[in-house]
Amino acid sequence: MFDLHGLQAKLALEALEVPVGCVILEEGNIIASGRNRTNETRNATRHAEMEAIDELIGQWRKDRLSPSQVAEKFSKCVLYVTCEPCIMCASALSFLGIKEVYYGCGNDKFGGCGSILSLHIGSSQTEQGQGGKGYKCRGGIMADEAVSLFKCFYEQGNPNAPKPHRPVVQREMG
C-alpha cells in the first residue's frame, strides 16, 4: 500500500511540501487520494487527509448523497497515510466516522493517534451534542520509507519555513 500513498508523499516532496500522502479505500478500491499542499495553497489546513476528504465529499455531493449516506460511506472507508495524522486530521477522521487508519511513522510533535493525543479512541458527547467516533488505528506500516522521505525533505531544507526574527545564538558546551 505504500506505493499508493507513498507516491502522494513523493509528489508532495517534489512540490517542496512536507512529504505526507494518503489514500482512502472503500471495499479495497482507492476512491480518493491527497498530499500535503499547505505551502502551495498558503493554507495550514491543507494536509493530505483533508485533501482526500474534500475530494470524497465533492464527489459525493455530485452524486447527490444525503448526509446519512455520506456518513454510511465514511464508516466503511480505510485511510492509509505515510505519517500519523495530526490532532486536526485525527479529530476530523473521528467526527467523520472513518472505519480504520493505517499510518507509517509516528508524529511525536502533533500526533493525534497516540503520540500526543488518542483521538482515534473517540470521545463522549460535547456540550453541543457532538462527539467523535472511535476508529481502529495502526502505525508502523512502511515506517522506514516514510522516515526516509522526511529525511530528504529536512536535508534539503524547507524553503517555506519562516525566517528567524533573531539570529540563532550558538552556545559552547562546557
Image (cartoon, rainbow, N blue to C red):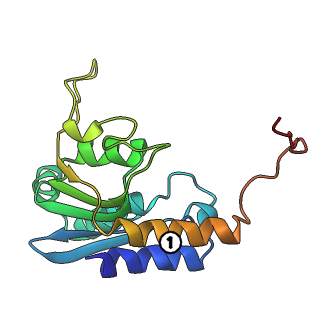
Question: Residue at position x 50%, y 52% from top?
Answer: 45
| Label 1 SS | helix
Q: Is residue 19 visible in the rendered structure shown here?
A: no
- Relative to residue 151, is residue 47 depicted above or below? above
The mark tally for this picture is 1
The one of 92 and 119 positioned closer to us in this rendering: 119
Question: Residue at position x 23%, y 56% from top?
Answer: 101
Horizontal and vertical percent position of residue 121: 20, 37
Query: Looking at the image, which residue sits at the far right?
Result: 167
Task: Find residue 144 and report its image quarter.
Answer: bottom left
Query: Looking at the image, which residue sits at the far top?
Result: 127
Q: Is residue 170 visible in the rendered structure shown here?
A: yes
The one of 127 and 100 positioned closer to us in this rendering: 100
Question: Residue at position x 36%, y 65% from top?
Answer: 143
Q: Is residue 109 left or right of residue 34?
A: right
The one of 115 and 35 positioned closer to us in this rendering: 115
Q: Is residue 5 left or right of residue 172?
A: left
- In this figure, which residue is indicated by the disc labeled 1? 149
Q: Which image quarter holds the C terminus?
A: top right
Horizontal and vertical percent position of residue 55: 34, 68
Q: Which image quarter holds the N terminus?
A: bottom left
- Relative to residue 17, is residue 46 depicted above or below? above
Q: Residues within 10 Å of mark 1 (few under 14, many from 20)?
A: many
Q: Is residue 19 left or right of residue 77?
A: right
Horizontal and vertical percent position of residue 64: 19, 65
Horizontal and vertical percent position of residue 50: 40, 57
- Relative to residue 74, is residue 52 depicted above or below? below
Question: Residue at position x 17%, y 56% from top?
Answer: 74
Task: Find residue 140 and report its image quarter.
Answer: bottom left
Q: Is residue 88 left or right of residue 46?
A: left
Dot 1 amino acid type: Leu
